């Protein structure tokens, strides 16, 4: 058997020197939020209409524009219904939703509903391409617990570029049981969405898309909800922050500059069983966390990203941004903030899907730009799964690079990590998980309700350069008696041995 080294694997691909993008730990970073000068923009709630059939209808236009990401400079960007990012979509559990989505960009794209349980034909992965000038009209019934989800492009080989240029938005799901909890819930007042991203800029203010590192385009400037240097005026003594790591490759270790604790109340797929008191939390690309933090009158506190602590066996951690410190967002409390209720001691019920040590149905090894030694092939189905079954998967990062793991359609539970119970931050519903090298993560998930012999779901690393270069696979969920009949994709240059998308480093 031939053994292929990383160097040999990458030898046939474009090789360029590593870009010096890493900021010195603790140093002020030009253009970052260390200079808080502008109020945080709050993405508007998307307008919608409900017809006689009870369906809530939304319209999205994917378009080009310019944004003032840096004060006084105009940056060409892409957005949904605007120049950058997108409106916050909101729907209730058991509500039917429908979208009319038009692509006004100069190239094809997709819209993926990250974290949503929905039919595969509506998933918005690389099989649901919207042509230039084309329209896509997905529709489904929301059937999952309250959660902070998001939507973003998923075109095969170009996802990083499309997200980097500004295409991201929140999708909040509500449900009746969560509505009764005494949590901060006034959108834009004490319930704040934060899309946290890193960017680099050229001298004239354009996005710098040159020279990605081995984990993608690392920026030296933090933008939150589309701008650098943001602050938030807080009018209540408790504020809920719905935080999304919308970066393509950067991992954040979030904490407050005075080391105060906060309460983690939810992760990717919804509320925890009880709040967890933490002083910091790590969030990899695609992950979401919801926290509640308390403030006293007139105080100012900085949300900051600290150096990454989980770095065992990581090669060139500094080049991957693990040593960087960034200011993210300053919170400015009112002189006499409105008093709000403490976070409830009990939040949600999470029934266990599997016991620790359960024999896995599938195992996944993450290494280089491959999963289980294979790169993505749009015309290859990697596995089929019977509908209405619970499965256990094990995932292991056998690399010296950072990777995470995202599964479409489901929310999963982390059953154990090397046989040990997960920490509080991983004890709730997840759809994206950072995989520290040499640990084995046992995940349990249920594939319910939706089956389709033609349209697949994806599993992949959500470091977007890795995804673009083939660190992805696909599966069909089948009803009893169904046989796979996958669609064929004409994707020149995108085969499993090809080189999709952007240049990368060897």
Image: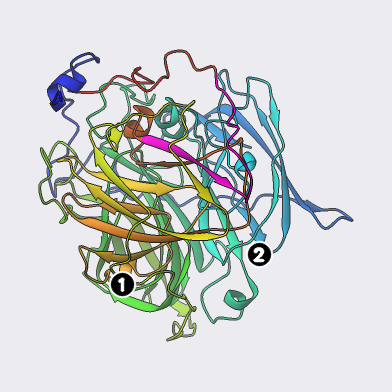
Q: Quadrant of residue 499?
A: top left
Secondary structure of the residue carrying tag 1 is helix
Q: Which mark is residue 93?
A: 2
Q: Quadrant of residue 473?
A: top left
Quadrant of the snapshot with the C terminus: top left
Q: Which mark is residue 122?
A: none
Task: Tell me the crowding category of disc 2: few under 14, some 14 to 19, or many 20 or more residues within 10 angstroms, Cα based.
Answer: some
Instruction: Name the residue: 18% across, 16% down.
Output: 11
Can residue 327 be seen by looking at this rendering?
no
Task: Tell me the crowding category of disc 1: few under 14, some 14 to 19, or many 20 or more residues within 10 angstroms, Cα based.
Answer: some
| Horizontal relation, residue 181 to residue 54: left or right | left
Separation (CA) of disc 1 from disc 2:
26 Å
Instruction: Name the residue: 15% across, 27% down.
Output: 6
Q: Is residue 484 magenta?
A: yes
N-terminal of the two: label 1 or label 2? 2
Front-lying residue, 424 or 241: 424
Front-lying residue, 107 or 324: 107
- Circle 1 is placed at which residue position? 424
Give percent across and percent down for residue 439: 19, 55
Q: Is residue 12 above or below residue 438?
A: above
Front-lying residue, 491 or 347: 491
| Horizontal relation, residue 85 to residue 361: left or right | right
Give percent across and percent down for residue 353: 44, 69
**Residues drawn in magenta:** 472-489
Can residue 28 be seen by looking at this rendering?
yes
């Amino acid at each position: 058997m031939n053994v292929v080294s990383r160097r040999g694997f990458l030898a046939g691909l474009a090789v360029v020197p590593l870009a010096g993008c890493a900021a010195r730990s603790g140093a002020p970073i030009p253009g970052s939020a260390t200079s808080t000068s502008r109020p945080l923009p709050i993405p508007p709630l998307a307008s919608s209409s409900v017809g006689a059939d009870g369906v809530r209808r939304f319209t999205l236009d994917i378009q080009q524009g310019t944004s003032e990401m840096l004060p006084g400079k105009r940056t060409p960007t892409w957005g949904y219904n605007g120049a950058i990012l997108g409106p916050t979509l909101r729907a209730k559990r058991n509500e039917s939703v429908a979208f009319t989505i038009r692509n006004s960009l100069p190239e094809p794209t997709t819209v993926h509903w990250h974290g949503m349980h929905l039919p595969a034909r509506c998933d918005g992965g690389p099989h649901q391409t919207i042509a230039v000038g084309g329209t896509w009209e997905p529709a489904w019934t929301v059937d999952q617990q309250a959660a902070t989800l998001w939507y973003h492009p998923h075109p095969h080989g170009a996802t990083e570029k499309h997200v980097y240029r500004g295409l991201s938005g929140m999708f909040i799901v509500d449900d009746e049981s969560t509505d009764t909890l005494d949590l901060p819930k006034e959108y834009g007042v004490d319930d704040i969405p934060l899309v946290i991203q890193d960017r680099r800029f050229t001298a004239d203010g354009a996005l710098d898309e040159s020279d990605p590192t081995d984990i993608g385009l690392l920026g030296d400037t933090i933008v939150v909800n589309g701008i650098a240097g943001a602050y938030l005026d807080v009018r209540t003594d408790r504020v809920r922050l719905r935080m999304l790591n919308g970066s393509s490759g950067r991992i954040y270790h979030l904490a407050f500059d005075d080391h105060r604790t906060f309460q983690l109340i939810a992760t990717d797929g919804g509320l925890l069983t009880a709040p967890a008191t933490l002083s910091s939390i790590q969030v990899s690309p695609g992950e979401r966390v919801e926290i509640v933090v308390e403030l006293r009158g007139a105080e100012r506190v900085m949300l900051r990203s600290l150096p990454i602590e989980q770095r065992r066996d990581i090669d060139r951690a500094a080049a991957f941004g693990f040593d960087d410190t960034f200011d993210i967002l300053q919170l400015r409390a009112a002189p006499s903030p409105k008093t709000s209720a403490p976070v409830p001691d009990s939040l949600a019920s999470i029934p266990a899907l599997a016991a620790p040590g359960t024999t896995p149905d599938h195992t996944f090894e993450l290494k280089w730009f491959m999963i289980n030694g294979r790169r993505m092939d749009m015309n290859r189905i990697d596995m089929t799964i019977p509908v209405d079954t619970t499965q256990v998967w094990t995932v292991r990062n056998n690399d010296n690079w950072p990777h995470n793991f995202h599964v479409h359609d489901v929310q999963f539970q982390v059953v154990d990590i090397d046989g040990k119970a997960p920490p509080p931050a991983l004890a709730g519903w997840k759809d994206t998980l950072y995989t520290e090298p040499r640990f084995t993560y046992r995940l349990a998930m249920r594939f319910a309700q939706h089956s389709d012999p033609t349209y697949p779901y994806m599993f992949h690393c959500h470091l977007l350069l890795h995804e673009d270069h083939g660190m992805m696979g696909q599966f069909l969920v089948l009803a009893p008696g169904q046989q796979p009949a996958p669609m064929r994709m004409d994707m020149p240059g995108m085969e499993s041995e090809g080189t999709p998308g952007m240049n990368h480093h060897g």
